[in-house]
Amino acid sequence: TARLPAAISYLLLSPFSPLFHLSLGGGGKGKSWKWKDMLRFPHISQCMELAKTLERDYYSLCVKQPIGRQLFRLFCQSKPELRHCISLLDKMGEYEVKSDKEKRSFGMQIINRFLSRQGLCVLGIHLLLLCFYSDLHEYLSGDTFLQYQQSMYFDRFLQWKMIERQPVTKYIFRQYRMLGKGGFGEVWAFQARASGKMYACKKLEKTHVKKGRGEAMALNEKQILETLNSRFVVSLAYAYETKHSLCLVLTIMNGGDLRFHIYNMGTSGLEQDRVQFYAAEVCCGLHHLHQMNIVYRDLKPENILLDDNGHIRISDLGLAVTLSEGNLVRGRVGTLGYMAPEVIGHKYYGMSPDWWGLGCLVYEMTAGRSPFKGKGERLIGKEMERRIQEEEEEYGNIFNNETKDFCRLLLNKDPRHRLGCQGSGVYGVKSHPFFRTINFRRLEAGVIEPPFKPDPRAVYCQDVQDIDEFSTVKGVILEKTDKDFYVKFNTGSVAIPWQTEMIEMGCFKELNVFGPQGSRPPDLDW
Ligand code: ADP
Ligand code: MG
Ligand code: MG
């Protein structure tokens, strides 16, 4: 592509440019004028192959996939006998995330509505007993699920699924400013043309990947990211290739990284409530990874990114690895200064390096320096390793008792005695007095207001002009055998994030009309 003259590209790409902000205005603005063509339903007869091959799993189709969930609900709403079932399901969901104070009265409301004499009539004794005994989903996954698959709502699901599975190319996105630079390429602000949703696109230059033998690592990062679904880890929405690069399209995190917030905001170190809040969200992110048997191995302030609202997500999963059930792994990877003693010592380990990493992170957020290196001190690698393996870290007055105790337990040199690595696992960490003011249930539901909201006008990173251009390396020739790897990488949209985009940006609502009259089912209150 031809480069724009410098002055013009500044105007177009600079975060300070009025054009840039124009394009960022969420709420469905920024859709291409052709967006409805981009999302045109195929005729149902074209979905038959998909219908044959799609795995008929109730949880995946009706609970986890956002569009699948909406359509299943529309189906249930169309049957009077199921309408109450869905509404009870919703109320129970709401009940789960109420604060302890509100729970009692909200619980009473549910009981009054569903268990009163009239309630018994609307819900039916059978269903009512079911919700005492087991999960309502178990009930729905039976006959209801079978009937759903015969309905027009499921046909529509197949149509959406066909759109979701369209090949992804660079023409699906608009490109804005550069956000940062990684080992194999640049990260840019991107916008999906069909919906207007903003993303970060991490480009891996094919020549750089080949020269650095990064194929396995790139594929590993992509394959781990696509299995995750947590509000505390960046999501992968698309993976595709262009002539020169492999692209990972990720949740955009505009608020800068924690390193920037710890060191470049005038003070060094963060206030106690922010330290607790970020540590708690990181803890939830680690919990999600560990549940899937993934060790992250690269916990450090640089890799924790803030979004516009002040929530954080774990990013850069290049070093993460999936352990096979019950197995341990060995490997000296991570960033020196944040590596756990067992990693430096070349021992076998499980999830323990991540809890060490959390200890380092809480220490650094509190003190404004990392636990084994003084402010501005320059250290050779060997000395750093010695300190990590042998020296006790010191705690100044800035640490209160809970924080000190928390860090000490996490920075235990022996992984067998470290907090998080014992029988109670992550629950041991979450129940430490350091987190006494955090309600994890509400935090995981995303209903807790962050203590700090980034200024939407500020840019929390190094000036883009200071970041060197990424050049393609010369003398590396891409061959036919490289193609096999590109094919594995180039899988297009990822179901859950793509469907979330369609719903969040209003595309689902606007396009999901039924019938020749174009009638839409009534708006439903979920
Ligand atoms: P690498 O694995 O090569 O180190 P990273 O994933 O760390 O690459 O990305 C490089 C830089 O790009 C980061 O330091 C950060 O500044 C920026 N960046 C990465 N992911 C995002 C994102 N999701 N949103 C905003 N900026 C990002
Ligand atoms: Mg990085
Ligand atoms: Mg990386």
Image (cartoon, rainbow, N blue to C red):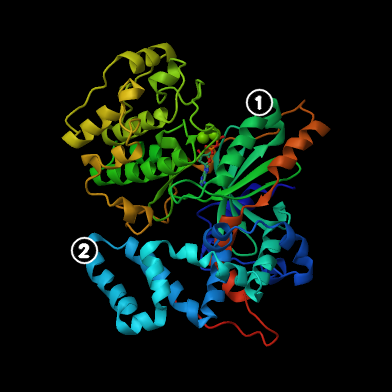
Regarding residue 400, the answer to whether it shows in the image is no
Which disc is residue 84 wearing?
none
Q: Is residue 407 left or right of residue 401?
A: right
Q: Is residue 175 left or right of residue 135?
A: right
User: Which residue type does callout 2 highlight?
Assistant: Lys
Instruction: Return the x and y of residue 412 as percentages of the image width and height.
Output: 30, 23
The residue singled out by tag 1 in the image is: 212
Regarding residue 91, the answer to whether it shows in the image is yes
**SS assignment at label 1:** loop
Instruction: Return the x and y of residue 224 as percentages of the image width and height.
Output: 57, 40
Q: Is residue 480 above or below residue 106?
A: above
The residue singled out by tag 2 in the image is: 101
| Residue, far bottom | 517
* Crowd tier of the residue under label 1, counting other residues whose Cα lies within 10 Å: few below 14, some 14–19, many 20 or above: few
For the point 51% across and 51% down, the residue is: 252
Instruction: Please tell me which residue lies in front, 507 or 345.
Output: 345
Instruction: Return the x and y of residue 22 as percentages of the image width and height.
Output: 54, 64
Q: Is residue 259 left or right of residue 227?
A: left
Instruction: Return the x and y of residue 47 as percentages of the image width and height.
Output: 75, 65
Among the two numbered marks 1 and 2 on one chain, the one whose residue lies closer to the N terminus: 2
Instruction: Please tell me which residue lies in front, 187 or 154.
Output: 154
| Number of marks in the rendered image | 2
**SS assignment at label 2:** helix
For the point 46% across and 31% down, the residue is: 298
Q: How far, Cα to Cα, is label 1 from label 2?
A: 55 Å
The mark closer to the camera, 1 or 2, is: 2
Q: Is mark 1 within 8 Å of ligand 1?
A: no
Instruction: Please tell me which residue lies in front, 297 or 21.
Output: 297
Q: Quadrant of the C terminus?
A: bottom left
User: Which residue type does callout 1 highlight?
Assistant: Gly
